[in-house]
Amino acid sequence: MIAGSMVALVTPMDAEGRLDWDSLSKLVDFHLKEGTDAIVAVGTTGESATLDYKEHIDVIHRVVEQVAGRIPVIAGTGANSTREAVELTRNAKEAGADACLLVTPYYNKPTQEGLYQHFKHVAEAVDIPQILYNVPGRTACDMKAETVIRLSTVHNIIGIKEATGDLQRAKDILAGVSSDFLLLSGDDPTAVELILLGGKGNISVTANVAPRAMHELCAAALRGEAAEARAINEQLMPLHKNLFLEANPIPVKWALHEMGLMPEGIRLPLTWLSAPYHETLRQALRQTGVLV
């Protein structure tokens, strides 16, 4: 079952922006050791927007191969072209992904009916479990609860990553879907509350640097142990906040470099974390026990 703490994995690169396969392997091992419940490969945090098509599928294939069935691998395959989303999803299935994560089509601003037809078409075209992904702050496209509820009855669509942080939205979705439809958070600060409402987990940026703590947070919330889950969340709040000092994944890649897990690499138009933020994020890493 897909549940718990799911890392939105970064894609490591060297200083010239070339993919760093050794560091990717190191990161996958890190998450397997530290209790991450699932890995999302080549999502927003994995710089899906700047990887070419072959790189995109190669990263998915490498992660699937290394994980070797020990935890689920979810492949980011969303696009603002329905045809491209179908092709990415089909190739992710062939690469061995357990499920796919499809962001709402960005930039071209479809209607709610357009969103319904887009996701329905991909689900009917490729027989693999699919998770919707709503993050209007990045896409300029907000999928309403009614559309999610409508899509929840489509074969292959098993859940949604709801990244608005709007807990009323989460309640509205839960009220209209079946009990086996997965509501997942995509907003680290509010993930605890969403899970306590009935969500099944969190696709997390913070889990890149604090995987054990995020696993324990989600596990406690799924058990209904609200006080424990909220206490862990409070400890992690400096990371939840400061990993967004600049656009994701700029800060989290800097943090992983600071931890010695990957080189200093990111692709334009993203740039390395601005110097004035270094000490602020370094202190957050120390405050949460990630760095000593």
Image: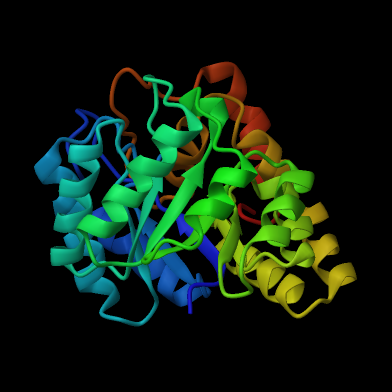
Q: Is residue 78 above or below residue 246?
A: below
Residue 172 or 292: which is nearer the viewer? 172
Q: Residue furthest left?
A: 54
Q: Nearer the viewer, residue 13 or 207?
A: 207
- On the image, the x and y values in percent for residue 152 come to 51, 60
Q: How is the image coloured?
A: rainbow
Res 99 visible:
yes
Q: Is residue 260 above or below residue 53?
A: below
Q: Position of residue 79 (x, y in %)?
A: 29, 36
In this view, which residue lies farthest toward the right?
Answer: 227
Is the C terminus in the top left, top right, bottom left or bottom right quadrant?
Answer: bottom right
Residue at the location (48% across, 80% down)? 1
User: For this view, does 244 lie left or right of residue 260?
Assistant: right
Q: Position of residue 77 (x, y in %)?
A: 29, 48
Nearer to me, 201 or 176: 176
Residue visible at 32% across and 17% down?
Answer: 269
Q: Residue at x 24, y 72 (%)?
A: 66
> Splitting the image into 4 quarters, where does residue 217 fall?
bottom right
| One can see residue 45 in this view | no
Asked if residue 245 is positioned above or below residue 285 in the image, the reply reads above
Kindly identify the residue that appears in the image at 78 percent across and 63 percent down: 197
Task: State the image coordinates of residue 22 (x, y, percent, origin top left).
Answer: 21, 56
Q: Quadrant of residue 51?
A: top left
